[in-house]
Image (tube, grey):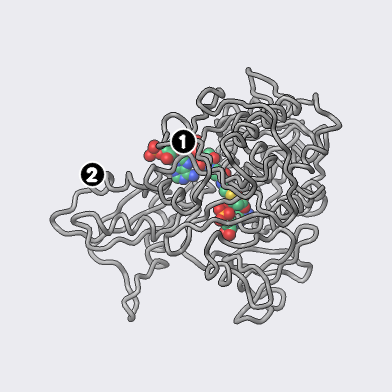
Amino acid sequence: MTSLHAHLSQAWGARPHRTFLSQPGGHQWSYEEVDSLAASYGASLQARDVTPGDRVMVQVAKSPYAVALYLATLRIGAVFVPLNTAYTPTEVDAFVEDAEPAVVVTGAANARPGSLILEADGSGTLKPGAGVEDVGRSGDDPAAMLYTSGTTGRSKGAVLTNDNLISNAKALVEAWRFHESDVLVHALPIFHVHGLFVALHCAMFTASTVVFLDRFDVGEVKRSLGDATVMMGVPTFYSRLLAAPEPFSGVRLFTSGSAPLTAATHREFEHRTGHAILERYGMTEAGMITSNPYEGARIPGTVGFALPGIEVRVTVDDAVAPPGIAGNVECRGPNVFSGYWRMPDHTAAAFTPDGWLRTGDIGKLDASGRLTLEGRASDMIISGGLNVYPVEVEQVLDAVPGVVEAAVVGLPHPDLGEAVTAFVTTDAAYDEQGARASLDAIARFKHPKQIVEIDALPRNAMGKVLKAELRSRYRSLFS
Ligand code: MLC
Ligand code: AMP
């Protein structure tokens, strides 16, 4: 039994009638019900000649039907490729061209030629079929591929194997003491590692219940927390909950990740609710890497210790750094992905010669092995838990008539952590409306919250734009 699907179905097989996905004011989906829907979607995909290893690309609204489609894909040995629903048709074109999926499933609003339709209420052209054939998969076989943006602006498909996902789920269940009686509030999207793997796998591996919300709505989340034991979120969830906090007395665990949780938010949340948020750290290529302890000190501003079975080190100039010295964070373990889809050079560059994954994050370990992150090697911006690569936005702005040059940075933002901000030098042909219209080619969460016209971009002697200076000069723009 080596496939992720086999592990999951064994976990919930003993409790098939237990509620899996609970929709407030709506249907309560048992494990058995979601599993049998997954079997019929699997049959339907097989009837369309989807075979093991084929990519199934999915850009659909969050719903129990979408979860069943994920499980169907695993069950037939195909590779699940989820896409952010905010991606524009132009962005999706690039993913389709790269992944060459056997099937693309979308909502009606973002339908593409040949795509199957699946709406949040289950309607559409993806009809359940009958007679799914189970397919044996080994631990090394790919289970999912998630696109991550790159410093060059070109997205890379990170291929995750069955073993990557199984080992990480087991490590989290152990570290966070997941149990069949847990009730998890799920308000994250399900097209990223956080909402799809971290949250859903912890629940499925313990056959526990998920309060399944379409999105993060602060009122709905607060109501749901009344009957819940766990919530996982990005820092924006916690800063929004702080606007009107409650004791949340039935909750045993709040976790945060995907972006830095400020020490101020951590302390204020603890002060006002009595809960010390457990911050953990991860990335698409490696799932979860470190976590603050379940028992023991959850220190604000730190991301804790390597999870069971995973090793973390810090290097400077290719040598392992002693405790207290900041450098490149690297990790190794069964969680680390098999490589980027059809990009051997990028895959090779992601690893050190001795086989450790270069995370691209800068941090330091203390003598006890606790990690503190200090920044990122690249200019990547994390806005509300979503990654934005400046070069992608700069390329769009540079092509706008009247823009002489654009530089995009992340500035501190009270709600989103960092806000995408563009600085442009312009000539007489420039107007901001035109620039905004051009940005429609890329997803809206990547759009600058402000486009600031300046006389000249600050540069060093080599002519390189000094983004650090822009960040420091304009650090109060959103406060
Ligand atoms: C939405 N908008 C954003 C945004 N989310 N803008 C910048 N950054 C974001 N993150 C924009 C929309 O385009 C829209 O713009 C406007 O905000 C309102 O949209 P919305 O959908 O109503 O927003 P809201 O529901 O408030 O969403 C904010 C959010 C959401 C923070 C709740 O983005 C979210 O759920 N983020 C979580 C992302 C996540 O799961 N990350 C995990 C990555 S995995 P307009 O212009 O149309 O008005 C990973 C590894 C790891 O990193 O370690 O976990
Ligand atoms: P992604 O490529 O979307 O998976 O994003 C991974 C990146 O998110 C990591 O490389 C980190 O830079 C960042 N990240 C994840 N968790 C944390 C955290 N707890 N604190 C700071 N940054 C984080």
Quadrant in the rendering for residue 397: bottom left
The tag on residue 63 is: none
User: Mark 2 packing: few (<14 Cα in 10 Å), some, or many (20+)?
Assistant: few
Type of the residue with mark 1: Ser
From the viewer's side, name the closer residue of 14 and 373.
Answer: 14
Residue sticking out furthest to the right: 14
Type of the residue with mark 2: Gln
Q: Nearer the viewer, mark 2 or mark 1?
A: 1
Q: Which residue is mark 2?
A: 433
From the viewer's side, name the closer residue of 313 and 192.
Answer: 192
Mark 2 lies on a secondary structure that is helix
Could one spot residue 270 in this view of the protein? no
User: Mark 1 packing: few (<14 Cα in 10 Å), some, or many (20+)?
Assistant: some
Within 8 Å of ligand 1, the CB of disc 2? Answer: no
Question: Percent position (x, y) of residue 287?
Answer: 66, 54
Q: Is residue 189 left or right of residue 1?
A: left
Within 8 Å of ligand 1, the CB of disc 1? Answer: no
Quadrant in the rendering for residue 204: top right
